[in-house]
Amino acid sequence: MPDGRLVIANRRTSSWSLRGWLAVQLAGLDVEEVVIPLTRPGPTAAIAAVSPNGRVPYLEHAGARVWESLAIVEYCAEQTPALWPADRIARAAARSVAAEMHGGFTGLRRAMWMNLGADFAGLGRTPEALADIARIEALWADTRARFGAGGAFLFGAAFTAADAMYAPVVARFLTWRPELSVASRAYCAAVRAHPLVAAWYDAAEREPAAWRLPEYETPPPA
Ligand SMILES: N[C@@H](CCC(=O)N[C@@H](CS)C(=O)NCC(=O)O)C(=O)O
């Protein structure tokens, strides 16, 4: 019998769900997965009925109730410390970039929402989104230069919680195709090829078309 449940929303468009799900997978928690499709206008009543903050991801595990993706990441890292880099200085940087993602980049998130099945190449390039993208590229480059020498991810060979926090950004970049450096594109390719990310994309493709929300399927004007 599973030790609890992880509540998420549509894989195609729920970027925060992807972060929580990756953390749970990386930690190897044995939880039932409950997918609640988003409804519009929100908030989604079925999510509000189960999650303390009315949002997903929401985790129940061995008596603990955890909401907010970053809190789920931290809970998972308590179970499996390798979610963060082992080195104290690298771990501090990983926590910082993860927190920066959790608390910011609203310009990007508003203009280039996650839709794994869409092709919105060239669109969504608002000044706010482009400023966020510049910061993200600088952050990725700096992190990889300082800690990433051993592999393709932010902290080297291991896909850590920091990569989990940025996986939905990668997904946005693959859908909206902003201009990116060669190094950023290589990082995006590595994240997309990770088996857990690939599994999420595959499962998203199998979701019922009826779950799709018109506001996330319609491209913004060019
Ligand atoms: N700060 C939250 C954000 C979670 C969030 O906004 N989740 C969205 C789905 S991606 C949600 O649950 N929305 C509820 C709704 O639209 O009804 C976190 O980090 O978990």
Image (cartoon, helix red, strand yellow):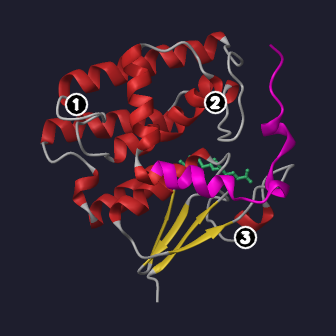
In depth, the one of 170 and 117 nearer the eye is 117
Residue type, label 2: Thr
- Per the rendered image, the range of residues in magenta is 197-222
* SS at circle 2: helix
Picture quadrant of residue 135 = top left
Disc 1 within 8 angstroms of ligand 1 (CB):
no
**Front tag of 2 and 1:** 2
The total number of labels drawn is: 3
Q: Is residue 121 among the parts visible in the rendering?
A: yes
Left or right: 11 in relation to 189: right
Q: CA distance from mark 2 to mark 1?
A: 25 Å
* Mark 1, residue position: 148
Q: 177 or 44, which lies in front?
A: 177
Image coordinates of residue 179 in percent, x first then y, are 54, 12
Instruction: Report the disc number at residue 175.
Output: 2
Query: Residue drawn at (44%, 54%), measured in percent from left and top?
Result: 196
Q: CA distance from mark 1 to mark 3?
A: 42 Å
Q: Quadrant of residue 159?
A: top left
* Residue that protrudes farthest toward the left in the picture: 87
Name the residue tied to disc 3.
49
* Residue at the image position 39 percent from the left and 25 percent from the top: 186
Which secondary structure is most common in the magenta stretch? helix
Query: Disc 2 vs disc 1: Cβ atoms closer than 8 Å?
Result: no
Which of the 4 image quarters holds residue 49?
bottom right
Taking the image as shown, residue 81 lies to the left or right of residue 212, namely left
Residues at discs 2 and 3 in contact (Cβ within 8 Å) = no
Task: Identify residue type, mark 3.
Answer: Ala
For marks 1 and 3 on the same chain, the one whose residue lies earlier in the sequence = 3
